[in-house]
Amino acid sequence: MDSPLPRRTRVVVIGAGQAGLSVAYHLQRRGLRPGVDLVVLDRGPGTGGAWQFRWESLRLGDAHRVNDLPGMAELGLSFETADATVPAREIVADYYRRFEDAYRLEVRRPVAVTAVEDAGDLLRVVTDHGTIEAEAVVNASGTWGAPFRPRVRGDETFRGRQWTTVDYVDAADFRGRRVVVVGGGTSAVGFVRELEGVAAATTWVTRRTVEFVEGDGLAQENGIAAVAAQDEAARAGLPLPSIVSGTKLVATPRIRAAIDRGTLVAHPMFTAVEPDGVRFADGSFVPADDIIWATGFRPELKHLAPLHLREHSGGIVVERGRVTREPRLFLAGYGPQASTIGANRAGRAVAAQVLALLDQKP
Ligand SMILES: Cc1cc2nc3c(=O)[nH]c(=O)nc-3n(C[C@H](O)[C@H](O)[C@H](O)COP(=O)(O)OP(=O)(O)OC[C@H]3O[C@@H](n4cnc5c(N)ncnc54)[C@H](O)[C@@H]3O)c2cc1C
């Protein structure tokens, strides 16, 4: 951070991942001046949003696809043609950096937002680098900072190591060890595949039955159903359902091959963790040195707590990205928007509503 933050602006965007950049792009295109009317804050050290922290072996093009940000085509950039041999975290960080530079978004980093408060006519954004007041705040803080881990009886007694998705760096950390991978999503499937031939033994368990489907068309259909379920919960102010539970997994050719050679065999969830392994409902026991909890994420919203947005039902009422209880606050990339394509759509929809709000002000 070279210069102090302004004390007052029109719009603060919290987070420079796909959602925050998309909103910032549309606001900038519609006349807001970055650094003056629009201040984008991100606590990460570099560009790339959460992608800068993904594990080294994660690549684009197989199970993972990143949609192009709006305005990327004009820069001659597309994730579709990105080099699939280079780690996704490097590609995304590089493309986002070029995008931020080209559109002069002036993202301020590393700046961590610790609270958003009601300051009467304005919202007050408290950060570790000072306080900014704004007419509107767009929260695009993603989920990476809030990995979800279910509690299981006895898990505190485990003598081995326990990890979540955000801790996973390299399969080499598990060389020669007996690993239990928990989770029914793409991350868990990726870990099981990577540990093949590295770990001494890998046991994959899922809380729900995993269904693999062939081809993108079906996956799209399932994706639409999952997004609809997220939207319904957000509008009703209910806690968001797990994305994984609504989405079947696509068997890419590599995943299909792993299924065929018996690597990807899902077992039902264990009922207890013991000091040296996990115990299943039928009494059987699997010894383990490591448990990887690839059990999803929750939106990271703790800095919004001073606004008291939660309903008794546990969720926040959000319609098309706008928070009903606090109409000066928008959640971009939340619920139905929590994918790169959803984040893109959020950008346009949220920016339009923010501009309409600003227009109402004298
Ligand atoms: C392992 C994994 C793989 C995925 N793969 C895909 C995929 O292939 N395709 C796809 O479409 N989606 C994928 N997703 C979903 C993915 O999260 C979204 O697609 C998208 O990248 C999220 O963008 P975002 O802007 O909402 O969040 P993020 O990329 O998480 O960006 C949020 C930003 O907010 C910042 N931030 C957070 N809190 C604060 C704070 N308090 N103060 C300041 N800054 C803050 C963070 O530093 C971060 O830069 C994947 C998710 C995971 C976990």
Image (cartoon, grey):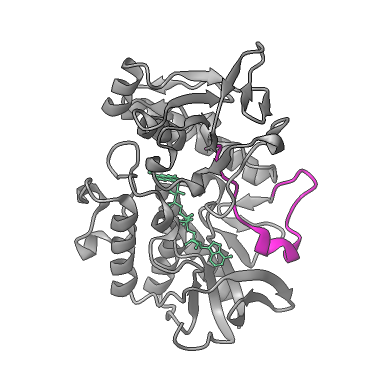
Left or right side of 356 for 248: left
Residue 108 in picture, x, y percent from top left: 46, 76
Point 54% across, 43% down: residue: 164
Point 42% across, 64% down: residue: 21
Q: Does residue 147 sit above or below 183 in this rendering?
A: below
Residue 190 appears anywhere in the view:
yes
Q: Quadrant of the C terminus?
A: bottom right
Residue 119 in picture, x, y percent from top left: 73, 78
Q: Does residue 232 sit above or below 267 in this rendering?
A: below
In the rendered structure, which segment of residues is drawn in magenta? Answer: 294-315
Point 50% across, 65% down: residue: 15
Q: Nearer the viewer, residue 346 or 113?
A: 113
Residue 334 in picture, x, y percent from top left: 55, 51
Query: Most prominent secondary structure in the magenta stretch?
Result: loop
Point 49% across, 69% down: residue: 42
Which corner quadrant of the image does residue 249 belong to?
top left
Residue 131 in picture, x, y percent from top left: 63, 81
Residue 151 appears anywhere in the view:
no
Q: Does residue 217 sit above or below 91 in this rendering?
A: above
Residue 302 magenta-highlighted: yes
Left or right side of 67 for 204: right
Q: Nearer the viewer, residue 360 or 78?
A: 78
Residue 130 magenta-highlighted: no
Which corner quadrant of the image does residue 259 belong to?
top left
Query: Which residue extends farthest right?
Result: 312
Q: How many marks?
A: 0
